[in-house]
Image (cartoon, rainbow, N blue to C red):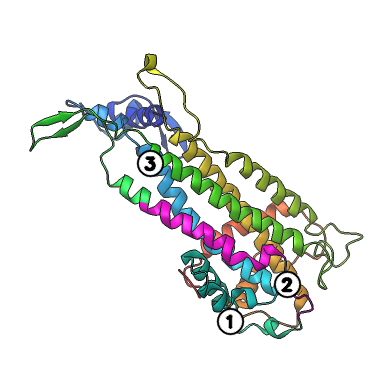
């Protein structure tokens, strides 16, 4: 099991072995236990095995990834909403009638959420010369919604898993039974964790396509969203970074669960690779956060080229708050600092109070 070795390292400090992090430093566990006047534990029968033989490592990663995924899915909807106005898109793809005849739950809720974010926008009434918008905008409810459906399914699986017994053997005192079984096998997590990585990568794919459309010099927006495209690069290199992140996530999205390798002299002849799926999912989450922060920078920059026409009161309030921290890009500067500041801003801001939540 891929969880076994990491769980062993996690458990070693309980018996005074291994290492721990303390006040930002990696230190020996026995030294830290003495510092806190704590005695190492003495395990009884099966207690040590229970700490090692289960799916706790993969489950912990899954829970963290899902919590972050929900936040990032909401951020993706917010970016798309701002992008609708910045790219002067039609609102018709968000109309409830379209989603009533294909009532996929995630699709319906995504369209509803984006419409709520755009309520009261002056830009909705501006003339739209294009009959249809690119898929990256027009199909947001379908793409973001499919990811939401995936998250809902994965949450059910993970909730069951973290409330389950996953060690071996299993002891049933009332029945006076000790049974050897396979509850330690993490296939039930490996498949959903791979699915999670793919679903989140798709949020990144469509996000990067929106970035590309917005910097392309279309629909009255200047190339690279800079006042002087011939002199300044504007958001051009930000799109390079976004494209690189998307490509990396595509690699991480190759399923781990299709792999297996024999071990333990043939006894353990099929393994789930859930731990690999879990650690890859975490990398995808962190990449997606950075990618969506870049899109947030781009849509805010693009939106300001629509002034004096304004977006919805909610989006305009958010824009003013953001501009108090990250100023508008007037001329070229180091964008890395802006990306890091934007990530921090979005983490601290939270999106719970915005319209259309859920």
Does label 1 or label 2 sit earlier along the sequence? 1
- The residue carrying mark 2 is 132
Q: Position of residue 146 (x, y in %)?
A: 53, 59
24 is higher (above) or lower (below) than 285: above
Q: Secondary structure at mark 2?
A: loop
Left or right of 121 on screen, residue 231: right
Q: How many marks?
A: 3
Residue 292 visible from this viewpoint = yes
- Camera-near label (1 vs 2) is 2
The reply to whether the magenta stretch includes residue 262 is: no
Q: Which residues are magenta?
A: 128-156
Residue 337, how many percent across, how many down? 69, 53
Element marked by disc 3: helix
- What residue sits right under mark 1 in the picture? 119
Q: Residues within 10 Å of mark 1 (few under 14, many from 20)?
A: some
For image coordinates 61% across by 84% down, the residue present is 120
């Amino acid at each position: 099991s891929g969880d076994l070795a990491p769980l062993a390292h996690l458990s070693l400090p309980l018996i005074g072995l291994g290492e721990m992090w303390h006040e930002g430093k990696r230190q020996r566990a026995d030294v830290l236990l003495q510092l806190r006047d704590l005695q190492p534990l003495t395990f009884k029968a099966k207690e040590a095995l229970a700490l090692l033989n289960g799916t706790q490592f993969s489950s912990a990663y899954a829970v963290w990834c899902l919590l972050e995924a929900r936040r990032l899915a909401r951020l993706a909807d917010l970016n798309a909403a701002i992008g609708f106005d910045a790219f002067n898109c039609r609102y018709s793809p968000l109309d409830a009638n379209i989603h009533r005849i294909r009532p996929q739950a995630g699709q319906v809720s995504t369209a509803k959420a984006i419409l709520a974010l755009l309520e009261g926008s002056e830009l909705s009434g501006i003339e739209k010369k294009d009959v249809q918008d690119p898929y990256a905008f027009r199909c947001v409810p379908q793409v973001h919604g499919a990811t939401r459906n995936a998250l809902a399914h994965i949450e059910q699986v993970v909730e069951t898993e973290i409330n389950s017994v996953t060690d071996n053997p299993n002891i049933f005192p009332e029945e006076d039974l000790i049974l050897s079984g396979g509850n330690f096998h993490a296939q039930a997590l490996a498949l959903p964790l791979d699915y999670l990585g793919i679903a989140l990568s798709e949020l990144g794919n469509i996000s990067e396509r929106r970035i590309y459309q917005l910097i392309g010099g279309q629909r009255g927006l200047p190339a690279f969203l800079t006042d002087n495209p011939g002199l300044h690069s504007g958001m051009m290199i930000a799109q390079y970074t976004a494209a690189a992140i998307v490509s990396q996530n595509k690699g991480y999205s190759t399923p781990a669960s299709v792999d297996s390798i024999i071990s333990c002299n043939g006894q353990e002849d099929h393994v789930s690779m859930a731990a690999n799926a879990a650690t890859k999912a975490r990398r995808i989450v962190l990449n997606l956060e950075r990618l969506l922060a870049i899109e947030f920078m781009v849509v805010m920059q693009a939106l300001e080229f629509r002034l004096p026409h304004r977006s919805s009161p909610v989006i305009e309030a958010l824009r003013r708050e953001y501009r108090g921290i990250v100023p508008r890009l007037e001329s070229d500067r180091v964008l890395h600092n802006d990306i890091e500041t934007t990530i921090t801003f979005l983490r601290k801001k939270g999106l719970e109070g915005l319209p259309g939540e859920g």
